Structure formats: structure tokens, C-alpha cells
Amino acid sequence: MKTVIANWKMNVNVRESVALARGVTRGIRGKDKLPEIVLCASAVALSEMKKILTRSRISLGAQNVHWAESGAHTGETSTRQLAEAKVSHVIVGHSERRTEMGETDVMVNQKIKALLAAKMVPVLCVGETAEVKKKNAEAAKKYVRDQLSAALDGVRFDRQKPFYIAYEPIWSISTSFVKQAKPEEIVEMHEVIRTWLDQQYGHDATAEVHILYGGSVNKENVYSFLREPAIEGVLVGGASVRLNEFMGIIKTAIEINGE
Ligand code: PGA
């Protein structure tokens, strides 16, 4: 079963978040073979979103979390606070947070541990920069493996609980078709990630670790990604705040789930 995760970033306000959530809920009514759908909203919209998504087949996600349960951490949000809004999934280590907010591998690791302790599902983002990609393919693979080993240091997977790793090469985020990662490049990196996981944890332990792709996914190109068995889902930014685009992506995921 494929997964479609929306990352609304800071692009919509509470009213628009509510309208989008209502639109998606309406759009999937009566449909089966749905992908797992997660809507990651801004912290201010979560409690309103909760009202709409409770008893729906859509999960609510957050875009960030602090590793402490409470305390003097101005401007941050804890798992305890997210749990109150019925958040189940949380994006960690997104490249925008790493570059703009100075989020380090150590912070990402602490956040993942906090999420697992709170029984929430991490959506860990990894991906190389354009400079690393320019060097050579080996450098990019090493970069991603290093990000994984730092983020997952001391992390134990539960065979029954989902865990997502989104491969988001930075050069492929919010870009054009020409510059975007090609399905074969993504599949290659997904295989690198899968092999690394198997070597570190064993195949059985990581049965519920799903590897997604993110970077300029839209309703036109999503089929080229989702038809690849190694690409277990997509993390969608820009296209996820346009209802029509996002429903197009879900429609394709439904078709592929039914194949
Ligand atoms: P994009 O963003 O789909 O707008 O490229 C993806 C992401 O940053 O998660």
C-alpha cells in the first residue's frame, strides 16, 4: 500500500488548512484502496484539523517537534502537546529546518527518540545537497548513509510500527521537471537506504520502515514515481496545498494500489 504525505509547510493559514482538510475528506468519500494519507499542518492549525479528521481515514501530522516533554523551550511544541491534538505522524529533519533553523543530526536523533517514546510515527527526511551531488554518485550515497546513521543512532525499530524515511534530495525540492530527480535515480538511492537498513538492523526488524520520495511531486509526475515498487510513497510540498493537484495524486495512488 502506498503512502501520500502532505507537507503544507508555512503556506496555509488555519482557515485554508481546514478547507483543504475538508476537501480531502470529501474527495475520498466512498473510495477504497486508499493510500495511507497524512496531512502535516502547522502547529496553529492542529486543533482545528483534529475536529475534521477524527473518525476519518486521514491521519494528522505535524511538521516539527521538540525532544523534551515540557519545559522552558520558547516557541517549541512537545509530543505531549501534539498528542492532545491527536497528531500521529511528525516530520523530522526536513532540509528546510536543517538549513534555516540549524537543526542538526543530533537534534534529529533526539526528536526521533522522543516520537518513538510517545508512540508517534516519525517521517525522517534525508537527502544530499546539490554540491554533494555534483561531486559524484558515491558522495551522495555516503552523505545519505551518514545522515541515517546519525539520525538513527541508538534507535530501535518496532516490527509492528510504521516508520517513514523520505528521501528528499535538496536539489529536487520545489523545482522544475528538468532539474527534478529521475525515478531511476530515486530508486537507486532507495536501494542504498534499504540495503543500509538491512545491514544495520536486519531485514525483519525494518519490515515496517517505508521509504518515500519527496521533491516537486505533482499529479502529472506522481505515477512515474509510485509505479516503482521501491518507492513506497511520496511526501508532497507545493502540490499538496492545491486541492485539485493533491486529489490527483491520491487518485493515482488509488489506481496503483489496485493494480
Ligand atoms: P515540494 O516540497 O513538493 O514543494 O518540492 C517537498 C518537501 O519539501 O517536502
Image (spheres, rainbow, N blue to C red):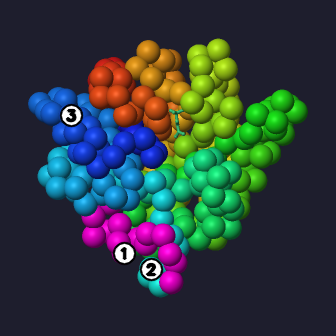
In what element is the residue under mark 3? helix
Q: How far apart are labels 1 and 2 at the CA level?
A: 6 Å
Residue that mark 2 sits on: 69
Residues shaded magenta: 72-87
Q: Position of residue 189 (x, y in %)?
A: 67, 35
Residue 173 is situated, as x and y percent measured from the top left of the image, at: 59, 33
| Residue 32 highlighted magenta (yes or no) | no
Q: For disc 2, does the CB lie below 8 Å from ligand 1?
A: no
User: Can you tell which quarter of the image residue 170 is in?
Assistant: top right
Q: Residues within 10 Å of mark 1 (few under 14, many from 20)?
A: some
Indicate the amino acid at tag 2.
Glu
- Would you identify the image quadrant in which residue 248 lies? top left
Which residue position holds label 1?
80
Q: CA distance from mark 3 to mark 1?
A: 28 Å
Q: Residue at x 35, y 28 (%)?
A: 242
Q: To which residue does mark 3 refer?
A: 23
Q: Secondary structure at mark 2?
A: loop
On screen, residue 72 versus residue 247, left or right, reads right
Give the residue at x 60% y 40%: 167
Q: Position of residue 131 (x, y in %)?
A: 82, 36
Amino acid carrying mark 1 in the image: Arg
Q: Does residue 130 appear in this view?
A: yes
User: CB of mark 1 within 8 Å of CB of mark 2?
Assistant: yes
The answer to whether residue 229 is visible is no
